[in-house]
Amino acid sequence: MAGGRGPLMLHIGLTGGIGSGKSTVARLFGEFGAVLLDADELVRDLLAGGESAAAVGAAFGPAVLAADGSVNRKALAALVFSDERARRRLEAILHPRILSRRREILDEILGRRGEQTVVVTEAALIFEAGTRGEFDEVVLVTAPEALRRERLQAAGWDPEEVRRRMEAQWPDSRKVPLADHVVDNGGSPAATRAQAERLWRLFQEKLHAAR
């Protein structure tokens, strides 16, 4: 479908603000049978060394590089989440590389798994990064901001870091009209699961209808 990967493969983008519970919903889709990709893992791989890490070091200085040539992600985050121009510079470096690598992985999955495959990519900045066109459909996970902060605090996040991350992301009110589906993860685990199951059935129907 989107991206020319064949008519019987469905590529779903899964997004949501920090603390919304994207990973929880992703795990549910994985349990149902989806192949899961995580944009954060792709970023970690890119920053582990090589050309991408070198490009980040050239843009932000040697202070963000470790002795082995990898990027110190904590030092980099301290820079980019307090400076919008720096964040945009980083995105300009990483986003094209992430897209290229993800397309390679999707081709590998299609070759390995064949048709009738649902791939779910978890990515926080689908709308912000302008990559909506990479996906056949986008699922937005939402939760009240107070609950999101509570979850992050319980997980040990620094409140100031949470504030910076939230400010770097669009609010749900801006993303909801752009999403194809919304999962409300502000209630019980059973309620979230029921919503994910409903979407999974819908995805399967779409795959079968495309045969």
Image: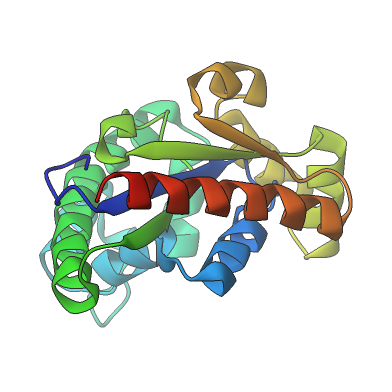
Residue reaching furthest to the bottom: 68
Residue 146 placement (x, y as % from top left): 86, 37
Comparing 193 with 17, the one in front is 193
Classify residue 45 by image quadrant.
bottom left
Viewer can see residue 53: yes
Comparing 185 with 150, the one in front is 185
Q: Is residue 24 left or right of residue 84?
A: right
Residue 104 vertical placement versus 209 (above, below):
below
Residue 98 placement (x, y as % from top left): 24, 53
Circle count: 0
Residue shown at the point (83%, 43%) measured from the top left: 186
Residue 201 placement (x, y as % from top left): 55, 52
Image quarter of the N terminus? top left
Residue 157 vertical placement versus 184 (above, below):
below
Q: Is residue 3 left or right of residue 81?
A: left
Residue shown at the point (87%, 50%) measured from the top left: 150
Residue 65 vertical placement versus 85 (above, below):
below
Residue 166 placement (x, y as % from top left): 64, 35
Viewer can see residue 158: no
Classify residue 25 by image quadrant.
bottom right
**What colouring method underlies this structural image?**
rainbow
Residue shown at the point (40%, 55%) measured from the top left: 121
Comparing 40 with 82, the one in front is 40
Residue shown at the point (52%, 43%) measured from the top left: 15
Comparing 73 with 23, the one in front is 23
Residue 11 vertical placement versus 38 (above, below):
above
